[in-house]
Image (spheres, helix red, strand yellow):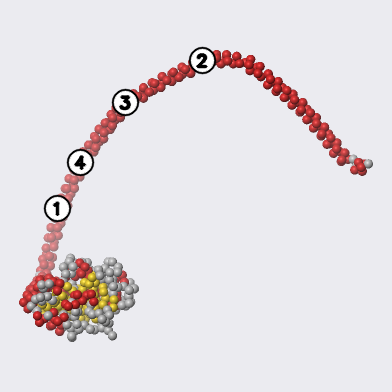
Amino acid sequence: MKTSIVFLLCISVFPGFCQGRVVREDETGFAECNVFFPGQVPPEGFTEPFHVKICQQYNKEPRFATLYSTKDKIPLYSAFKFTKPAQSEEENWLVEPQIDDPENNLHEMVHEANIGGTVANLGANQALTSDYKGSGYERGLLNPSLLNEEDFQVATYTLTNAVPLSPALSKSWHRDIGKVVEQALTPHCSKMDHLYLLAGAIPSSVQVNGKVSVPESLWLAACCDAPEGWSLGLVKKINDENSLADLTVRELEKQLLPGVHLFKGNCGENKQNQEKREAVLQVVSEIRSGGQVEASNTQETKESGWVRRVAGIIATPFIKLLELLIYIFVELVKFVFYFLWLVVKQVVGTILDGVYSLWNGVVSYLKAISMVLISIPYDVGRVIINIFLGFLQIVQDVVSLTYRILSIPVGFILHLAAFPYHSICAIPSVLKDMATGIGGTFLLVIDATSAVLHGFYYLAGHIVKRFVPKGSSDD
């Protein structure tokens, strides 16, 4: 049994905004991205096992659908709707890890440089940025970014939406498709949200670096699935960047794989409004003619290029001389202005210095006068206080001197009067001290005599014990 794989992709700056999953057999088409097909029915006839269906998402919203060939490593078509064009975004290319490694847990598009070694067989089933280096080809968008508003535009910069194109062809494709959609298709579809667009590529045998197939042609299929609707096909050959052939959708399908049907019921081909379709083709013809005129002008420009180069060589010395004179004149003007600036600066500086010095002098003078005026009351008060304190000191000195003069006779009289009293009162104390001294002396003599006698007794006893025999002592 064959299972189709739908990778739900997103380019989000926040983690967890996108998931990848395997579509079951009971699921059809591109899952959430079926809204980019009339009647939500994708093209039929692309049944090869290497055809991978991708629902390109951003911020959890489907932005466009892509059928990717892992054999050719290019998208076979991208289905989208026209949204409000936005300013061109900076190219920020990403790859889808699960195309090469379905078991990988990276469920969102990431920068190739940030993958490292986390994806097995990276580049086995999809193109990488390195495949384009040095090849002379650039990554051309099937779903041009210029036809999308901001969120949709960011989602277009994935390598699963890019095919190898020469720089000139890539520019021509984006220019022509942009004009066709904005000037021819959108104005003639009564409901813009019912305008379904398929941009595709037919792989060739030519490969970039032996890996990525270069398309042999690019095509655009449009279906206005609305009242007074219509459908249209356009083809641009790779070998002619200015070509833009218009044809019916059925004629376009014959140039693709056998059994391919791009739109359900051929977008009501039997009920289409031929007047609307002719109006669309008329605008497409004008765009094609304008492109051819632009190409012709480009060729004429190339042919006249050598004339301009010769004229440039002849005129170069005069131009250089004129540039030198202009340079000298500019430098002289700059020097004059610089000199005037220095003079003005010096004069103004001198004046400002004088004014500043004068101001400082006035401020210092006013400050000194203020300090003097403020100090007068203070000094007067301090003098008065000093006079009063001096007077108090004089009074204190007079009182102290008087006291000392008067204290001399009074003290003498008091000591003289107290002498008999102190003399009589001292007699008992003197007698007591004398008795105490005599008694102490007598006790001292007795203690000395007793000590001498005790010493002689101890000495005699010791001599007797030493020299008298023990036997004699017993008798």
Task: Kindly report which numbered mark, 2 or 3, lies closer to the viewer in this rendering.
Answer: 2
* 78 vs 42, nearest the viewer: 42
* Element on which disc 3 rests: helix
Q: Which mark is residue 329?
A: 1
- Name the residue type under label 2: Ile
Mark pair 2, 3: CA separation: 44 Å
Residue that appears at 26% across and 68% down? 12
Crowd rating for badge 3 (residues with CA inside 10 Å; few <14, some 14–19, many 20+): few
- Label 4: which residue? 348
Mark pair 2, 4: CA separation: 83 Å
- Label 2: which residue? 405
The tag earlier along the polypeptide, 2 or 3, is 3
Image coordinates of residue 103 in percent, x first then y, are: 32, 77
Image coordinates of residue 423 in percent, x first then y, are: 65, 17
Image coordinates of residue 21 in percent, x first then y, are: 29, 76
Crowd rating for badge 4 (residues with CA inside 10 Å; few <14, some 14–19, many 20+): few
Image quarter in which the C terminus is found: top right
Residue that appears at 10% across and 75% down? 227
The tag earlier along the polypeptide, 2 or 4, is 4
- Name the residue type under label 1: Phe
Q: Quadrant of residue 414?
A: top right
- Label 3: which residue? 376
Q: Which mark is residue 136?
A: none
* 216 vs 387, nearest the viewer: 387
The tag earlier along the polypeptide, 3 or 4, is 4
Crowd rating for badge 2 (residues with CA inside 10 Å; few <14, some 14–19, many 20+): few
Mark pair 3, 1: CA separation: 70 Å
